[in-house]
Image: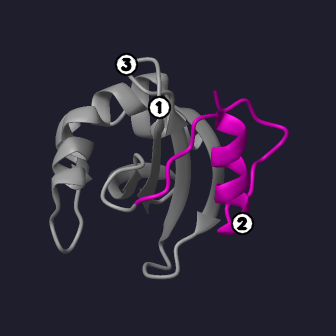
C-alpha cells in the first residue's frame, strides 16, 4: 500500500493532530499538516504497538523557510477493512522544545529505521 498517498487522500475531517501534554510544537504541527502531507517523503512503516488494528508511518518534509531542521512526523493510520479510514499525527519533531531536528531526508530515514520503521522497496512512496 502507498501509505503516504492514502493519508494525503483522506478528507480533512479524517486527519487529526494530538499530543499529551499539548505543547506549542503540536500547535505548529496543526498549522504545518497540509505542508507536510504535500511536500513530505515517506520514510517507513511499522505496526502500531498501541493499536493492533493500526499502522504507523514516518514522514519527513524539508523546512518551509529553506534552512534549518525539517519536519519529522509520525502518523498512526487506522484501517477499515483494507483502506485507510483515519490518521492521527502523534509525533512532530522540528528541532524545537528539545525535539530532534533533521536537516536531510537521509538523517530522518536513519532515525526512523532506528525506531522500527521499515521501508517497502517495491513501492514508490515519494
**Region of the chain picked out in magenta, as a range:** 99-126
Q: What whole-number distance in Å separates the C-alpha atoms at marks 1 and 3?
A: 8 Å
Q: Are marks 1 and 2 in contact (CB under 8 Å)?
A: no
Q: Is residue 121 left or right of residue 52?
A: right
Mark 2 residue crowding within 10 angstroms, few (<14) / some (14–19) / many (20+)? few
- Mark closest to the chain's N terminus, 2 or 3: 3
- Give 68 or 12, whichever is nearer the viewer: 68
Classify the position of the C terminus by image quarter: top right
Is 85 placed above or below 52 here? Answer: above
Classify the position of the N terminus by image quarter: top right
Mark 3 residue crowding within 10 angstroms, few (<14) / some (14–19) / many (20+)? few
Residue 114 disc label? 2
- Residue designated by label 3: 65
Q: Secondary structure at mark 2?
A: helix
In the rendering, at what x and y percent does residue 66 appear? 45, 17
Q: What whole-number distance in Å separates the C-alpha atoms at marks 2 and 3?
A: 27 Å
Residue 124 inside the magenta-drawn segment? yes
Q: Are marks 1 and 3 in contact (CB under 8 Å)?
A: yes
Residue 88 visible somewhere in the drawing = yes
- Give 107 or 47, whichever is nearer the viewer: 107
- Residue designated by label 1: 68
- Residue under the image location 65 percent in, 36 percent down: 105
- Give 116 or 16, whichever is nearer the viewer: 116
- Give 36 or 69, whichever is nearer the viewer: 69
Name of the residue lying farthest toward the top: 66
Q: Is residue 30 left or right of residue 56?
A: left
Name of the residue lying farthest toward the right: 122
Examine the image and state in which quarter residue 103 appears: top right
Q: Secondary structure at mark 1?
A: loop
Is 106 placed above or below 84 here? Answer: above
In the rendering, at what x and y percent does residue 51 appear? 43, 78
Q: Is residue 23 left or right of residue 74?
A: left
Amino acid at each position: 500500500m502507498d501509505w503516504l498517498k492514502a493519508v494525503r487522500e483522506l478528507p480533512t475531517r479524517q486527519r487529526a493532530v494530538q499530543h499529551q501534554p499539548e505543547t506549542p510544537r503540536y500547535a505548529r504541527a496543526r498549522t504545518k499538516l497540509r505542508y507536510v502531507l504535500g511536500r513530505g517523503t515517506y520514510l517507513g512503516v511499522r505496526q502500531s504497538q498501541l493499536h493492533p488494528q493500526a499502522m504507523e508511518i514516518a514522514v519527513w518534509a524539508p523546512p518551509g523557510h529553506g534552512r534549518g531542521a525539517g519536519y519529522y512526523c509520525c502518523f498512526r493510520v487506522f484501517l477499515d477493512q483494507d483502506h485507510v479510514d483515519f490518521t492521527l499525527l502523534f509525533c512532530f519533531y522540528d528541532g524545537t522544545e528539545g525535539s530532534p531536528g533533521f536537516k536531510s531526508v537521509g538523517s530522518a530515514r536513519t532515525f526512523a529505521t532506528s525506531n522500527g520503521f521499515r521501508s517497502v522497496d517495491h513501492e514508490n512512496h515519494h
